[in-house]
Structure formats: structure tokens, C-alpha cells
Image (tube, rainbow, N blue to C red):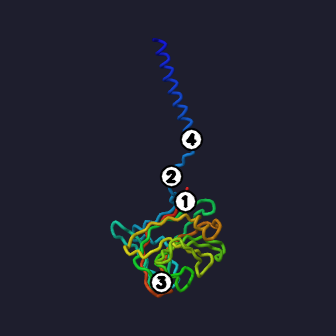
Amino acid sequence: MHKKKTRLLYTVVFCAIAALLLTLVYERLIKPRIKPAQKAEIVRSFPFSTADSLKEWEEKVFKGRVLYKVEQNNPLSYVRATSAGTASALYYKIKMDAKRRSPVVSWKWNVDKFPPKEKEDLETEKQDDFAARVYVIFPAAFFTKSKVLEYIWAEKLPEGMTGTSPYSKNIKLIVARSGENKDKKWFQEERDIVADYIKVFGTRPEYDIGAVAFMTNTEHTQTTADAMYDEINLGYKE
């Protein structure tokens, strides 16, 4: 009887030690290889939640001023951009590493009215009016070497289409959203900036990100357009 109890005790102790060893092996060797889902590290977020949310943004006027205004319709709060034959952009200066890290940009947008066009084209100056655009800017010491990614919402061009701006070979356009938006829905976008840069320029970014911008314009068609922007976020993908 005494021997049976001793064997049972040894068995319990052995099982406990074995379980401990298995736990240590899992923690040190197996578990580190299982990578949990990574969330973006947010560097700057713009919820446009107050009337003075645009005070930290600067304006670049190209031809007449677009009306940018924060609208608060509970529970929504956003920037409405109304263009009537005008073109001006709002931009925010920010320093982000695009040469060694993996920056991402996300935003929400909605289009009420597209500028009427007989033909929609990415690379023709006369057709270079779009209801909504978001820019990621890579400034260089020499302005002519600066690079720009320009995400647009096109009414008719296919999503994923890319092109070169009629103004500069260093500005690449990407159709991030396509369609008339008859139901006036909000859409969320998230873009891998380096992946998009490589796709349109063929190499990794040579310069860091220096600014983000958004614009609605109709100066070429001399028509009107109306769009909304919200929750612009910049961060790093880990």
C-alpha cells in the first residue's frame, strides 16, 4: 500500500514538472513565433470634431478659394468642401519616416456632387477636376524633386487605375474610389503608402513624408462640386 502511494506521488510530481517544462518551451520557443494581429501606431488623428478643427491646417490657393467648413450633425462631424469654379487645398505639415518604416493613411469621405464632365481622364488638364482628393506629400530640398501621391474619388474611372498628373511627372494619381455615390454613403479608405509609392514610382520613397492634404476642385470645368472629409489618420504599420 505504501509503495502504491509513493508511485502515485511520483507520478503527480512528474506530471507537474512535465507540464512546467512544456509551458516554458511554449513561452520561449513557440509563442514568440505566433505574431498577434498588429494595429497601426497612430501618429496624428484629425476627427474634425470642433468648429475650430481647421485652424491647424494651412490653405494653398490655386484658383479661387474652396469653401471648407466643419459641419456638426449629431452624431457626425466632418469637413464639407464646396467648390464653384475654384481650386484650393488644405494641408497639414507632418514629419514621418517613409524610408525605413511603413506609414499608412486612412480617412473617410462622402461625395454629394461630382463636377459634370463630358469625359473623365486622369492625365488631361481640362479634365483635372475631381470632387474629392487626398494627398501624401514627400518634399525634397529642391522643389522639382518633390514627390506626391494623390488619391482621388472618380465618378467613372475604374478603381485602382493610376496615372500621372498633367502638371508634373512627380505627382502620381491613384483612383481610390469610383462611382456616383447615389445613396450619399460614407466610405472608409486605408492605404499602405510605401506599397502605393512603389507601385506608381517603381522604388521606395527617397524622402520622408512632409505633409498631408485634401482638396475639392472645379476650376477647369467651371462647374460645382461638393464633398465631405472626416477622420484623417496617419500612422505606422508594424
Q: Residues within 10 Å of mark 2 (few under 14, many from 20)?
A: few
Of the two numbered discs 1 and 2 in the rendering, the one whose residue sits closer to the viewer: 2
Q: Residues within 10 Å of mark 3 (few under 14, many from 20)?
A: many
**In the image, what residue type sits under mark 4?**
Ile
Of the two numbered discs 4 and 1 in the rendering, the one whose residue sits closer to the viewer: 4
Is residue 91 among the parts visible in the rendering? no
- Residue holding disc 3: 218
The location of residue 96, given as percent across then percent down, is 58, 63
The location of residue 211, given as percent across then percent down, is 55, 70
The location of residue 141, given as percent across then percent down, is 66, 72
Q: Residues within 10 Å of mark 4 (few under 14, many from 20)?
A: few
Tell me the SS state at disc 3: loop
The quarter of the displayed image where residue 170 is located: bottom right
Quadrant in which the N terminus appears: top left
Q: CA distance from mark 3 to mark 1?
A: 33 Å
**In the image, what residue type sits under mark 3?**
Thr
- Residue holding disc 2: 37
Q: CA distance from mark 1 to mark 2?
A: 14 Å
Who comes first in sequence, dot 3 or dot 1? 3
Residue at left 46%, top 81%?
66
Who comes first in sequence, dot 3 or dot 4? 4
- Residue holding disc 4: 30
**In the image, what residue type sits under mark 1?**
Tyr
- Please say if the residues under marks 3 and 2 sit with CB atoms less than 8 Å apart: no
Seen in the image, is 102 located left or right of residue 226? right
- Please say if the residues under marks 3 and 1 sit with CB atoms less than 8 Å apart: no
Who comes first in sequence, dot 3 or dot 2? 2
